[in-house]
Each structure stands twice: as structure tokens, then as C-alpha cells.
């Protein structure tokens, strides 16, 4: 299934500007550098995978000065993963 999301906020700028549409789908695999959608509490976020350790992900926003990411909430369980962005390719 293909998901469509609109980027909110500037945490992924300049790669993904606010208002930009992205297309994502359930991934076969995840690698550092991939941009993913994940759930943290009631919110859905879009960030870049920085590191993978077993079944956990460390994610960062491209605009780290304005990003709420793993530096704040720590490593993510793979179960929080919603989808991997497939377009635009970055």
C-alpha cells in the first residue's frame, strides 16, 4: 500500500520542505540514510535513519537545529516504523 504524507515543519529542510508531498510504503529493508515515517506516541514523524542496532533505529532530522529526533527521545523500536519514503528519492 502506498501512503501519501505532507511534510510539516522544517526539521527535514532543505531535503524536504514544509508542504512537500512524499510517498511511502512498507519497506523490505531499512538502511542508514533512508527517510522513514514512524510513530512516537500519538504523533507521526519523518526523519532520516542515522544508525541501526539490532531491531532499533536512531533517527535524525536533516535540519538538526530544528529537529526533535533520537537525540531527544532515544532509540526507536522497529515496531514504531510506519513506512519508508520512496519519493522523492533523496
Image: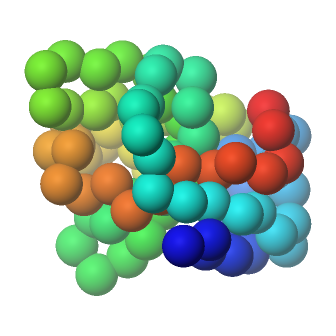
Q: Residue at x 25, y 57 (%)?
A: 80
Q: Residue at x 82, y 69 (%)?
A: 21
Q: Residue at x 66, y 34 (%)?
A: 62
Residue toward you, 89 or 6: 89
Residue 1, compared with residue 89, is above or below; it is below
Residue toward you, 34 or 46: 34
- Residue 83: x, y in percent? 47, 57
Where, by quadrant of the figure, is residue 34 drawn?
Answer: top right
- Say whether residue 1 is left or right of residue 43: right
Quadrant where the C terminus sits is top right
Residue toward you, 5 or 40: 5
- Residue 23: x, y in percent? 72, 63
Quadrant where the N terminus sits is bottom right
- Residue 89: x, y in percent? 81, 38
Q: For residue 16, say whether it is visible.
A: yes
- Say whether residue 60 is left or right of residue 54: right
Where, by quadrant of the figure, is residue 48 drawn?
Answer: top right
Residue 53, compared with residue 66, is above or below; it is above
Q: Please, which residue is most extreme toward the bottom here? A: 42
Amino acid at each position: 500500500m502506498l501512503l501519501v504524507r505532507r511534510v510539516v515543519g522544517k526539521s527535514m529542510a532543505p531535503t524536504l520542505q514544509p508542504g512537500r508531498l512524499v510517498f511511502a510504503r512498507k519497506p523490505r529493508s531499512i538502511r542508514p540514510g533512508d527517510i522513514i515515517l514512524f510513530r512516537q506516541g500519538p504523533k507521526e514523524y519523518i526523519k532520516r535513519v542515522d544508525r541501526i542496532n539490532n531491531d532499533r533505529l536512531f533517527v535524525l532530522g536533516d535540519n538538526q537545529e530544528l529537529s526533535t529526533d533520537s537525540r531527544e527521545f532515544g532509540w526507536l523500536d522497529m515496531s514504531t516504523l510506519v513506512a519508508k519514503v520512496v519519493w522523492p528519492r533523496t
